[in-house]
Image (cartoon, grey):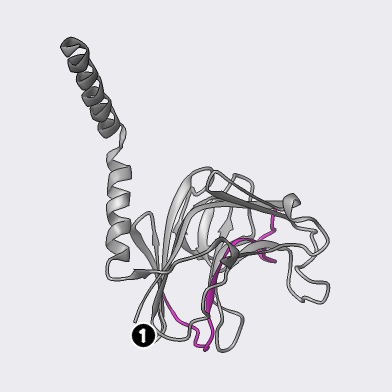
Amino acid sequence: MAAASSSTSRSLLLLLVVVAVSASPTTLAGAARSAHLTAGFTRVRLRESQFVVQRPYDVPLRERYQHSGGVRRMWVFAFDKPIRATHPRGARTEIKVDVTIYSSGVWQFEGDVFVPSGTSGASVMQIFGAATHATTLMLHVYGGRLTYYHDLRRVLAAGVYDRWVRLHVVHDVAAGNVTVFVDGERRLSAPGQGGSEHYFKFGVYKQSHHQPSRRMESRWKNVAVYTKP
């Protein structure tokens, strides 16, 4: 019995060593950076009902959205209808994070996004609400590049196709600025756009610039929202 117990202990120890070695330095560093970026913030408790899916009004949810294994998969076609027959905007399958609409404080969106190759001409994340137009921030994808709106000169990350990318988006309402971190690295600081009501959205939303692809998709996991006064 003693020999069997000793053998079991050695096996468990070996398994722990293998797990520790398998965690790459890049993964560990990314996790550390993410923890640093959310330090001082309070995580907002989100219920599943607060992930509100907006999709083309004439198709069933299952034909544009899947949620399995912690991953939310959203896709849309360039020819799809808007979210309502009377809605003036373009095709999208997006999730509105339906927490309290904020007008003050500092708010942070966190999530991992995966964009399959071929998706182009789509917004994958936005801060809704501004003084003079609809949004304070939009992150677009064009040819595997993550950009600030449709400005191809302001590339936050290249080569985002077919890999998980960690995003942190911080909106300081009083200071009037937005900061975007990609895989823990600061990649954008932009002015806020004013406005008194804001919330986060993510998914795919067809844009009219730079020849959008026929089909657009993004996948998301580990989405969280944080705040502080």
Which quarter of the image is occupied by the N terminus? top left
- In the picture as drawn, the residue positioned furthest to the front comes out as 1
Nearest the viewer among 182 and 44 is 44
The image quadrant that residue 41 belongs to is bottom left
Q: Residue at x 56, y 81 (%)?
A: 129
What residue is rendered at 27% in x and 40% in y? 25
Residue at the image position 33 percent from the left and 44 percent from the top? 27
Residue 12 x, y percent position in the rendering: 25, 24
Q: Position of residue 102 (x, y in %)?
A: 48, 82
Q: Tell me if residue 147 can be seen.
A: yes
Q: Quadrant of residue 18?
A: top left
Whether residue 214 appears in this view of the structure is no
Check disc 1 and give the amino acid type: Ala
At mark 1, the secondary structure is loop
Label 1: which residue? 175
Question: In the rendered structure, does residue 103 fall within the stretch colored magenta?
Answer: no
Badge count: 1
Q: Which residues are magenta?
A: 189-214
